Image (spheres, rainbow, N blue to C red):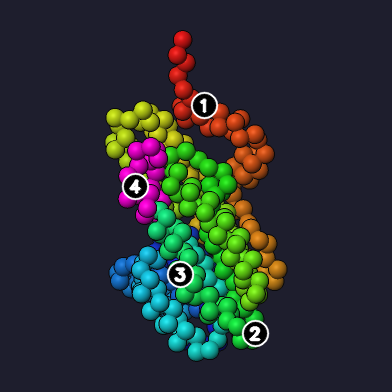
C-alpha cells in the first residue's frame, strides 16, 4: 500500500454512516483505518473495501486496545501526518429516564463521551498536536446529533451524551488552536442507519405510565427514519468537510432543516415542550 496516500481514522465502521464513510474515503483515494469490535467484521470489511482499508480491532471503551491501535497506525504512517479522525462510534438505547437502568445510562456515556475522548487523545499526536510539529495538521470530525441541542423525549441518555459532545468539542476546539488542529462538530439529523434498530424495548416499560406514549414515539421515529438521509449521502458530506480548506465550526446535516433544526431552536422552550408532549401523548391528564 502506498504510504503517501492521505489517511484517516474512522471509528465504528461495521455499519451505517461509518461503513459508508469508509467506502467514500477509499473511493476518494484515501487509506482508511477503521475500528471494529469483531474479527469477523474486520475480515468482511477488508474483503469489501480492499487493500486501502486497514481494520483496527478495538472497542472505544478499551484504553489499552486504543493505544495499541494508535501505535499501529503510527507505524504504518511512517512519519506522515494523519489527515483526519472521524469519531463516529456510538450507541443509542431508548427509554424513559425515570425507569431506564443506570447500567444502560452509563453505557451511553462510556461509549459516546468517554470513549470518544480517549480515542481522540490517542490519535491527536498523529494529527499534529505536538509541540515541535512542522507541516499541515489534520482535523477531527465529531459525529454529533441535532439532539445535542434539540432534545427528544425517551432518548434522554443519548441526548445527554450528544449535549456533552457539544461542550467538549467547543472547549477542545479552542485548546487545539495551539496546534492548528480544527475540531468540527457534525450535527446529524435523521439518517437511515441501524443505530436505532434496538429502539425502545416497550415491554420493559409496559407497567409504567410511559408505555403508551413511548409506543407513539417509536412509531414516530420509524416513520421519520424512512425519510432520513442515506448513509452514503452523509459520507459524501464528510469527505467534502474533510477536504474543504476552511471548514465551518459546526454542520447541521438534517433532512428537514427548517422543521427539525431551525424552528425547534427558535420556538420558546415551553411551546416546544407542549408540541412534543401533545404529539406523543405526554400531557398530564386533566384532573377535574
Disc with the residue nearer the chain's start (2 vs 3): 3
Disc with the residue nearer the chain's start (4 vs 1): 4
Residue at the (46%, 79%) spot, across then down: 52
Is 243 on the left-hand or right-hand side of 208? right
Residue on which the image places disc 4 = 102
Which residues fall within the magenta stretch? 90-107
Residue at the (50%, 89%) spot, across then down: 78
Residue on which the image places disc 1 = 278
- Any part of residue 133 in sight: yes
| Label number found at residue 135 | 2
Where does residue 65 sit, x and y in percent of width and height? 36, 74
Helix, strand or loop for disc 1: helix
Most extreme residue toward the right is 246
- Any part of residue 26 in sight: no
Would you say the residues marked 4 and 1 are in contact, meaning their CB atoms lie under 8 Å apart?
no
Q: Nearer the viewer, mark 4 or mark 1?
A: 4
Disc with the residue nearer the chain's start (4 vs 2): 4
Residue at the (45%, 14%) spot, across then down: 287
Where does residue 96 sit, x and y in percent of width and height? 39, 38
Instruction: State the CA–CA distance, disc 3 to disc 4.
Output: 24 Å
Instruction: State the CA–CA distance, disc 1 to disc 3.
Output: 40 Å
Would you say the residues marked 2 and 1 are in contact, meaning their CB atoms lie under 8 Å apart?
no
Q: Residues within 10 Å of mark 3 (few under 14, many from 20)?
A: many
Helix, strand or loop for disc 4: helix
Most extreme residue toward the bottom is 78
Instruction: State the CA–CA distance, disc 4 to disc 2.
Output: 45 Å
Q: Nearer the viewer, mark 3 or mark 4?
A: 4
Residue on which the image places disc 3 = 119
Amino acid at each position: 500500500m502506498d504510504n503517501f496516500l492521505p489517511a484517516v481514522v474512522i471509528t465504528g465502521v461495521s455499519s451505517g454512516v461509518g461503513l459508508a464513510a469508509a467506502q467514500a474515503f477509499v473511493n476518494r483515494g484515501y487509506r482508511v483505518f477503521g475500528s471494529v469490535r469483531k474479527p469477523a467484521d474486520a475480515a468482511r470489511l477488508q474483503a469489501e473495501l480492499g487493500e486501502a482499508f486497514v481494520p483496527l480491532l478495538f472497542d472505544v471503551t478499551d484504553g489499552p486496545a486504543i493505544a495499541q491501535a494508535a501505535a499501529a497506525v503510527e507505524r504504518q504512517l511512517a512519519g506522515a501526518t494523519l489527515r483526519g479522525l472521524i469519531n463516529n462510534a456510538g450507541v443509542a438505547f431508548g427509554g424513559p429516564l425515570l425507569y431506564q437502568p443506570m447500567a444502560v445510562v452509563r453505557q451511553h456515556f462510556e461509549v459516546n463521551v468517554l470513549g470518544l475522548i480517549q480515542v481522540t487523545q490517542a490519535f491527536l499526536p498523529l494529527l499534529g498536536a505536538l509541540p515541535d510539529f512542522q507541516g499541515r495538521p489534520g482535523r477531527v470530525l465529531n459525529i454529533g446529533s441535532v439532539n445535542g441541542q434539540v432534545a427528544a423525549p425517551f432518548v434522554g441518555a443519548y441526548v445527554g451524551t450528544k449535549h456533552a459532545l457539544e461542550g467538549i468539542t467547543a472547549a477542545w476546539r479552542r485548546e487545539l488552536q495551539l496546534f492548528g488542529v480544527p475540531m468540527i462538530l457534525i450535527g446529524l439529523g435523521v439518517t437511515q442507519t441501524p443505530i436505532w434498530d434496538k429502539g425502545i424495548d416497550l415491554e420493559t416499560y409496559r407497567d409504567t405510565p410511559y408505555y403508551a406514549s413511548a409506543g407513539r414515539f417509536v412509531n414516530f421515529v420509524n416513520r421519520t427514519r424512512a425519510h432520513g438521509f442515506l448513509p452514503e449521502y452523509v459520507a459524501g458530506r464528510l469527505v467534502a468537510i474533510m477536504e474543504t480548506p476552511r471548514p465551518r465550526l459546526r454542520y447541521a446535516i438534517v433532512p428537514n432543516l427548517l422543521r427539525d433544526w431551525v424552528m425547534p431552536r427558535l420556538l420558546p422552550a415551553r411551546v416546544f415542550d407542549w408540541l412534543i408532549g401533545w404529539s406523543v401523548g405526554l400531557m398530564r391528564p386533566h384532573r377535574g
